[in-house]
Image (spheres, rainbow, N blue to C red):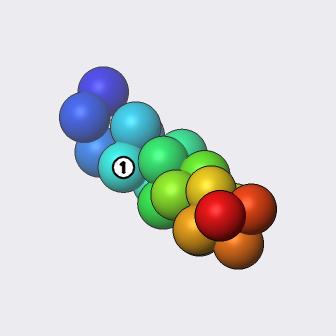
Amino acid sequence: MKRNANAFIRPFKRLAAHRS
């Protein structure tokens, strides 16, 4: 579950950085 979250958060964190 943690691994899946990492892959799901990885692209999400990138989007947040771009939005910032």
Quadrant of the frame with the N terminus: top left
Percent coordinates x, y for residue 2 in the rendering: 25, 34
Left/right placement of residue 18 relative to residue 3 reads right
Q: What is the quadrant of residue 17 in the picture?
A: bottom right
Q: Is residue 1 above or below residue 20?
A: above
Q: Residues within 10 Å of mark 1 (few under 14, many from 20)?
A: few
Left/right placement of residue 14 relative to residue 7 reads right
Percent coordinates x, y for residue 9 in the rendering: 48, 48
Q: Is residue 5 above or below residue 19?
A: above
Left/right placement of residue 11 relative to residue 2 reads right
Name, please, the residue furthest toward the front: 20
Counting the numbered discs, the total is 1
Q: What is the quadrant of residue 14 in the picture?
A: bottom right
Residue 3 in view here: yes
Residue carrying label 1 = 6
Residue at position x 52%, y 58% from top? Answer: 13
Residue at position x 36%, y 49% from top? Answer: 6
Residue at position x 74%, y 62% from top? Answer: 19
- Front-lying residue, 8 or 16: 16
- Front-lying residue, 16 or 9: 16
What's the amino acid at mark 1? Asn
Left/right placement of residue 3 relative to residue 19 reads left
Name, please, the residue furthest toward the left: 2
Residue 11 in view here: no
Name, please, the residue furthest toward the top: 1
Percent coordinates x, y for residue 3 in the rendering: 29, 45
Dot 1 falls on a residue whose secondary structure is: helix
Percent coordinates x, y for residue 20 in the rendering: 65, 64
